[in-house]
Image: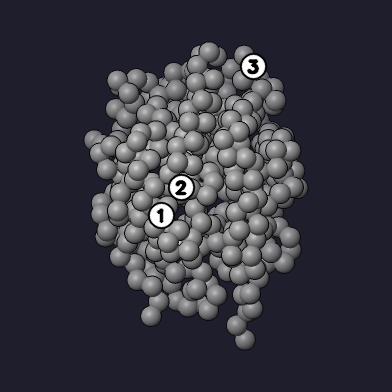
């Protein structure tokens, strides 16, 4: 007998956002913005196709020219970018959906060719790492970033607040702060990438200061009940490390919970139910510390979400590649329908091919 999937379709309050189901579309970088880093009609079609999600989290969107790290990624700092995103939100709302904008500064995960005037990318500390930036000239080695001066940091906070205001003008239902995946706020949180000796480095409280200041600035624009945040305590991509990640992220989650945010969105280990020694941070540490709605991410399928809901480990789960290939993913999960195959060669860049041409189930 097929498993009862009805718990997936129980409504959920994410602060002021009413999600009709527990199936969230994860933020998915697709690098199809135009030359001015603005989204356009193609993105409006793409997101509207997926409006049956309980909530859509947009692809990561740079808050400023300095925040850019990928060729073809969109921004939210110019009028053309605001106008482009307004077309997307209007299409999603017309299709009955709800959508938040993910606010992004990549920090050191960039390249001078992507920065204004060819400047060095910025970071908490001038620490290099191995890997390749995705530039307009193809892959290029990451460079050693420039450490931000203390007096520059309030300007970063202001950039987040300005981007949050622009997101409101563009018609989003809220915003998600990207404090995960080895980008700027994550770099400040972890002591492997933050060797500062000022008020933004050293102690746990100091390393979390920028994430919390950014959160407070964005909450001042939107209200806490329309602001979410994303964390990835167990990811070690792009040279990330921390001497005590459980303590670091438990502290951050506790402080974020005190702010009564709409939700916390966590990139979990591939199997959060596995041996605790096989993961850096038990996701339940963050869930308990935060205390509010918890969206889990990382390789979920319907059975894992149902188990997590039944066991109280999550309130919703976000799906990435499954949503890319299946615009009608909630229906497919509900009815146990087969999934489309992913066109992996067309994940990044290009046009409609591998983007808006995935069929709904007939």
Image position of 15 (left or right of 71)? right
Quadrant that contains the C terminus = bottom left
Is the Cβ of the residue at disc 1 closer than 8 Å to that at disc 2?
Answer: yes
Q: Which residue is mark 3?
A: 199
Badge nearest the viewer, 3 or 2: 2
Report crowding for label 2: few under 14, some 14 to 19, many 20 or more residues within 10 A (C-alpha).
many
Quadrant that contains the N terminus = bottom right
Image position of 211 (left or right of 86)? right
3D distance between C-alphas at marks 3 and 2: 36 Å
Q: Earlier in the sequence, mark 3 or mark 2?
A: 2
- The disc at residue 171 is 2
Counting from the top left corner in percent of width and height, residue 306 is at: 65, 68
Q: Secondary structure at mark 2?
A: loop
Report crowding for label 3: few under 14, some 14 to 19, many 20 or more residues within 10 A (C-alpha).
few
Q: Earlier in the sequence, mark 1 or mark 2?
A: 1
Above or below, comparing residue 288 to residue 48 in the picture: above
At a point 63% along the width and 79% down the height, the residue shown is 3
3D distance between C-alphas at marks 3 and 1: 42 Å
- The disc at residue 90 is 1
Q: Secondary structure at mark 1?
A: helix
Counting from the top left corner in percent of width and height, residue 37 is at: 32, 39
Is the Cβ of the residue at disc 3 closer than 8 Å to that at disc 1?
Answer: no
Badge nearest the viewer, 3 or 1: 1
Kindly tell me whether residue 249 is visible in this rendering. Answer: yes
At a point 53% along the width and 39% down the height, the residue shown is 178
Q: Secondary structure at mark 3?
A: loop
């Amino acid at each position: 007998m097929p498993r009862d999937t009805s718990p997936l379709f129980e409504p959920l309050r994410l602060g002021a956002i009413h999600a009709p189901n527990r199936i969230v579309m994860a933020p998915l970088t697709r690098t199809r913005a135009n030359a001015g880093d603005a989204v356009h009609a193609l993105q409006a079609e793409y997101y509207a196709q997926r409006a049956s999600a309980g909530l859509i989290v947009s692809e990561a969107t740079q808050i400023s020219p300095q925040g850019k790290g990928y060729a073809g990624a969109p921004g939210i700092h110019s009028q053309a970018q605001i106008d482009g995103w307004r077309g997307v939100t209007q299409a999603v709302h017309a299709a009955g959906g709800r959508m938040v904008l993910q606010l992004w500064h990549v920090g050191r995960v960039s390249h001078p060719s992507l920065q204004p005037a060819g400047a060095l990318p910025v970071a908490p500390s001038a620490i290099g790492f191995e890997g390749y930036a995705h530039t307009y000239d193809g892959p290029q080695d990451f460079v050693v970033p420039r450490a931000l001066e203390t007096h520059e940091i309030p300007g970063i906070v202001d950039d987040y607040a300005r981007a949050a205001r622009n997101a409101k003008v563009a018609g989003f239902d809220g915003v998600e702060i990207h404090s995960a995946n080895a980008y700027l706020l994550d770099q400040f949180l972890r002591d492997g990438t933050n060797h500062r000796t000022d008020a933004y480095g050293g102690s746990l409280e100091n390393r979390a200061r920028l994430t919390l200041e950014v959160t407070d600035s964005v909450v001042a624009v939107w209200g806490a009940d329309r602001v979410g945040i994303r964390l990835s305590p167990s990811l070690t991509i792009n040279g990330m490390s921390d001497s005590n990640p459980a303590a670091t992220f438990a502290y951050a989650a506790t402080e974020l919970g005190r702010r009564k945010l709409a939700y916390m969105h966590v990139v979990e280990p591939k199997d959060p139910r596995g041996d605790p020694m096989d993961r850096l941070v038990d996701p339940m540490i963050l869930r308990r510390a935060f205390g509010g709605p918890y969206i889990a991410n990382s390789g979920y399928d319907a059975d894992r979400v149902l188990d997590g809901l039944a066991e109280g480990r999550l309130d919703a789960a976000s799906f990435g590649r499954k949503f890319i290939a299946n615009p009608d993913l909630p229906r497919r999960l509900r009815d146990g329908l087969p999934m489309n195959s992913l066109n992996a060669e067309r994940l990044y860049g290009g046009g409609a091919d591998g983007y808006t041409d995935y069929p709904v189930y007939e």
